[in-house]
Image: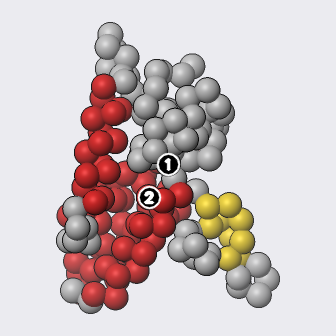
Amino acid sequence: MINSDNLVVDGLTEDCNPTGDPFSYNSGILIQSLSSLYEITNDNVYLANATLIANAALERFQSSDAPGILADDCCKSVEDCDCDHDGISFHGILARSLAAFVKAGGDVDGNVASVLKINADTAWDNRDADTNQIGIAWEGAILE
């Protein structure tokens, strides 16, 4: 279910070719799984594959308002955000999985940790000050 862009998609054709839309959580789950397999086996092939998918996910799932801030297609900008109840959490799953990748030692150049820090700081800086709630679009205000 990994397409030619190293993104995990939602399905397979009858002849087992990847098809469907990529969502950040799909890539995230595989990144975290491969990172865990590396930690268990110390087999570098798992970390190498996690690196390919992590790099592709970081390139693909970004906000159009704030490049580098994780976002899914349903919410690429604060003004154009229409995620369903599941979609609002997809980039959070990717962030958690990227953290597992960093912990496993896959972030050789420190890029992923830097992206995660920027995302955490941006989300916190844009929270609702009264409730500490963080919105769907981490670079913007809470959306109803």
Tell me what residue is drawn at x 26 percent, y 72 percent.
106
Is there any visible trace of residue 23 in the rendered image?
Answer: yes
Tell me what residue is drawn at x 25 percent, y 55 percent.
113
Give the total of numbered labels: 2
| Residue 4 picture quarter | bottom right
Q: Answer above or below: position of 89 versus 12.
A: above
- Seen from the viewer's position, the closer of residues 125 and 129 is 125
The CA span between labels 1 and 2 is: 7 Å
- Quadrant location of the C terminus? top right
| Residue under numbered circle 2 | 58
**Number of residues whose C-alpha sits closer than 10 Å to that of mark 1, classed few (under 14), some (14–19) or many (20 or more):** many
- Seen from the viewer's position, the closer of residues 20 and 138 is 138
Q: Position of residue 119 (x, y in %)?
A: 34, 41
Mark 2 lies on a secondary structure that is helix
Please state if 13 lies on the left or on the right of 136 as rendered. Answer: right
| Residue 49 picture quarter | bottom left
Please state if 123 lies on the left or on the right of 80 as rendered. Answer: left
Q: Position of residue 123 (x, y in %)?
A: 35, 32
Tell me what residue is drawn at x 42 percent, y 51 percent.
93
Residue that lies at the very extreme toward the top in this rendered image: 130
At label 1, which amino acid type do we have?
Gln
Asked if the residue under mark 2 is in contact with the one under mark 1, i.e. CB atoms within 8 Å, the reply is: yes
Q: Answer above or below: position of 42 versus 80.
A: below
- Seen from the viewer's position, the closer of residues 97 and 110 is 110
| Residue under numbered circle 1 | 62
Tell me what residue is drawn at x 46 percent, y 21 percent.
141
Q: Position of residue 44 (x, y in %)?
A: 28, 87
| Residue 58 picture quarter | bottom left
**Number of residues whose C-alpha sits closer than 10 Å to that of mark 2, classed few (under 14), some (14–19) or many (20 or more):** many
